[in-house]
Structures are given as C-alpha cells and as structure tokens.
Image: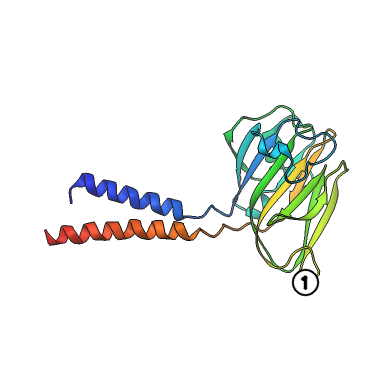
Amino acid sequence: MNLKVASIVLSSCVAAMLVAAPAKADTVMGSVWANGATTTVPAAGSSIYSTTPTAVVSISNSNSQAIINFFSSTDTSLTGFLTTSAAAGHPSNGDTVTYLSGANQSNINNDLFQFTGTTTLATGTYTTSHDDGLILYLNGSAVINDPGLTAAVDTPFTVCASGCNATPGTYSFVLDYAELNGAPAQLTATLPLTSPTPEPSSFILLGSGLLGVAGMLRRRMKV
C-alpha cells in the first residue's frame, strides 16, 4: 500500500469517526430572529421558525449546566447577553459564543431566541427564570408555557414517575424565549445537558471505515 492510498484510507477513517462522534454535552445551539416577537413568544409551528434567523450561534461552557444563564441590563449587545450571568453583580457566565451565521447585534429588544440541545432529567423539580416570555418543549411537548410579558419570574416543571410534567429520561429540548419589552433581559435554565446518542448509521459508517483500513493492511502484509 503506497503512501497516497494509505493517506486516503486513513482520511476516510477519520471522517467516519468524526461523523460517528456525538455532539459535546457542553454546547447549545441558538438561533436569533431580530424583532421576531412583539407581545408573546410564538408557539411551535409558527411561520417565523421556518424563516432564516438573523444569527445562529454555538454556545459552549466548561460547566454545561451554566450555559443557559443569560442577562442584559441594557439590551445593547447580543454577545453581552449570552456571556453575562444573571447572578448578583452580573459577572461573566463563562460562555464562549461562536457565530455560525450573522453577527453580534447592538439591540436585542424584541428579539426572539430559540435554544436547542439534549438533556437527561432525573426525578425532581427544575426551574427556569425568565424576563420575558418562555416556552420549553421536551421531545415536542410543552412543559413550560409562559409566553407573554413578565418581570423576572421563576417557573418550575417537575419530573417523576407519573403525574408530573415529564418522566425521568433523556430528551431533546427546544427553549423559545423572547425579550419583549425592553431591558432587562434574563433567561436561566438549569437543564443537565447530555450528548445525543449517535444514530445506528453512524456506527455502521465508523465500522466500515475501520474494516477498510484493516483490509488494506492485510493485503499489504501478503505482498
């Protein structure tokens, strides 16, 4: 096996491994629509969610449960909102924001936000704090539906074996939030983030790549 062939095979194997690797648990994806909401957070299925966002961001943090902890006292910077903690004194939350499309905005008033990821929930009560509206979906079902104007308010949902908002398990979540009526903007959610399970096709692709390398090496040894 010459070096060129070996390079191609190894590159294919690496690509297969990257496809198979799940997204990291310490990352949340966010989409932002400027002036996307006026008095309420649009419900799932609203036409605005099928339009192109003003900005798409990847938000990462070494502490995954600290990612969704956003605050702005001025509404003058999207990046500032996503990297400022709602804690007393408003320190940095440690988030790293990467723009995948669009750019930082100088005004987030009346912006609509959508954050997505995967969470694993145990039995207990989970609380979000928001100013203004918020709808939280787990696997497509709304467990918090408080879409209108509000001062900062804590809104809980419960997880238990039966009779609660959700049962213990791993969920894809969609968190829709809107800054509706001027500063301050605030959103916190202590969702335990987890990496999504890779699709079976990803494992098949990874296995095929490794088998290809093994076959080439075997043939080389016979030469």
Residue 170 appears left or right of 202: right
Relative to 194, does residue 93 appear above or below in the rendering?
above
Residue lying farthest to the top in this orientation: 106
Relative to 114, does residue 160 appear above or below in the rendering?
below
Residue lying farthest to the bottom in this orientation: 161
Q: What colour scheme governs how the chains and residues are painted in the rendered image of this protein? A: rainbow
- Image position, residue 7 (x, y; %): 26, 46
* Disc 1, SS: loop
- Image position, residue 82 (x, y; %): 69, 40
Quadrant assignment for the C terminus = bottom left
Between 60 and 39, the one nearer to me in the picture: 39
Amino acid marked by disc 1: Ser
- Residue indicated by mark 1: 162
Whether residue 90 is visible here, answered yes or no, is no
Disc 1 packing (10 Å; few <14; some 14–19; many ≥20): few
Whether residue 196 is visible here, answered yes or no, is yes
Q: Residue at the location (30% across, 50% down)?
A: 10
Residue lying farthest to the left in this orientation: 223
Q: Quadrant of residue 163?
A: bottom right
Residue 103 appears left or right of 201: right
How many numbered discs sit on the rendered protein? Answer: 1
Q: Quadrant of residue 114?
A: top right
Q: Quadrant of residue 180?
A: top right
Between 138 and 184, the one nearer to me in the picture: 138
Q: Residue at the location (70% across, 48% down)?
A: 68
Residue 162 appears left or right of 193: right
- Image position, residue 196 (x, y; %): 57, 57
- Image position, residue 14 (x, y; %): 37, 51
